[in-house]
Image (spheres, rainbow, N blue to C red):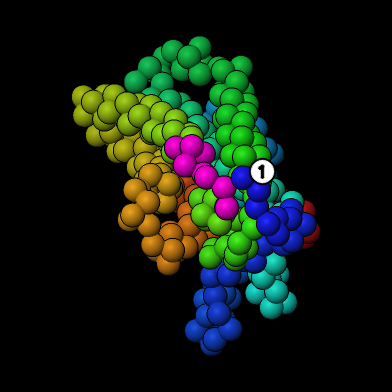
Amino acid sequence: MKYANVTTEINFILLGLFNHTQTHLFLFSMVLMIFLTSVMGNALLFMLICKDPQLHMPMYFLLSQLSLMDVMLVSTIVPKMAANYLMDTRSISPAGCGTQIFLFLTLGGGECFLLAAMAYDRYVAICHPLHYPILMNQKLCLHMTIGSWLLGGVDGLMQAGTTMSFSYCHSREINHFFCEAPSLVRLACADTTFFELFMYVCCILMLLIPLSLILASYSLILAAVLNMRSTAARKKAFATCSSHLGVVGLFYGAIIFIYMRPKSYHSVAHDKVVSAFYTIFTPVLNPLIYSVRNKEIKGALRKLLEKHFLGHQ
């Protein structure tokens, strides 16, 4: 079946998150502030972990990769959204749209597996502390990190490639503030039933497999912590794990809400708000959650500030 007026050169229209009202201008300013705070916070955390030899451990290496993914995630979405809003244009090219889908899924999928790797690291550190250097060595840590990036990249490449291969011959208005595969597929004039099923299966694999590993790790951790005789050790273990569980809950809760609900339960307004939550707001929380309750990171920051200020005196 052939479709009339099909072209890949016409830009898509992003309807965006905000209108040009006083209230929305204030909200837009808040989003920009959160974006800048997120980029600076995650970049600082990444730099501290790279520069301080005391933080050259698997747990902090994985955390540095989480920060890198978060910086890239917000930078994939917010600058384009801000440029469109400030210049009062809403267009995005097919190439730009495909790039956003690819990067978003690569980083989102990679973060899912990275959080599972971090849960395994905590499991080994708490349940098998004497065997930690063997069970969580640098080679394994590097393999888990590369695997997270590769699995996310494969998912992003498949979904972005398939999404952009559809014909879009009707309305090219995307009721969103960035190109997200489910929002774009709704505009296709081809039968997308098989692809939507494929996308759903990908979501199950990319979300539920890492989530199952995280839950299994923390079930074993909880059992080990409850059997600890030392109150101080128990408090330290709970403090470390609660930070990670907070990040996991925020990230997974929002993504499962978007990608794994039945189609009949989808609301465009709700989807946009939840998408904003995990693409813009969650990344700014990660450095706060991990650094505020972490003595080693606070110590590394103190040393950096002392070195900087003493060096200029």
Please state if 117 lies on the left or on the right of 47 as rendered. left
Residue to which mark 1 is pinned: 165
- Residue drawn at x 56%, y 24% as measured from the top left: 144
Residue 140: x and y in percent read: 56, 18
- Residue drawn at x 67%, y 70% as measured from the top left: 90
Residues 220 and 81: in front is: 81
- Residue drawn at x 44%, y 13% as measured from the top left: 131
Q: Is residue 306 visible?
A: no
Kindly identify the amino acid type of the residue bearing the numbered disc 1: Ser
Rendered-image quadrant of the C terminus: bottom right
Quarter occupied by residue 184:
bottom right
Above or below, comparing residue 206 to residue 168 in the picture:
above
Rendered-image quadrant of the N terminus: top right
- Residue drawn at x 54%, y 75% as measured from the top left: 18
Asked if residue 137 lies in the magenta stretch, the reply is no
Q: Is residue 274 visible?
A: yes
Please state if 69 lies on the left or on the right of 252 as rendered. right
Asked if residue 194 lies in the magenta stretch, the reply is yes
Provide the secondary structure element on which disc 1 rests: helix
Residues 123 and 171: in front is: 171
* Circle count: 1
Question: Looking at the image, which residue sits at the far bottom?
Answer: 22
- Magenta residue span: 188-197
Residue 229: x and y in percent read: 21, 26
Residue 155: x and y in percent read: 58, 34
Above or below, comparing residue 91 to residue 49 in the picture:
below
Residues 300 and 167: in front is: 167
Mark 1: few, some, or many residues within 10 Å (few <14, many ≥20)?
A: few
Please state if 88 lies on the left or on the right of 273 as rendered. right
Quarter occupied by residue 156:
top right
Above or below, comparing residue 115 to residue 103 in the picture:
above
Residue 95: x and y in percent read: 74, 51
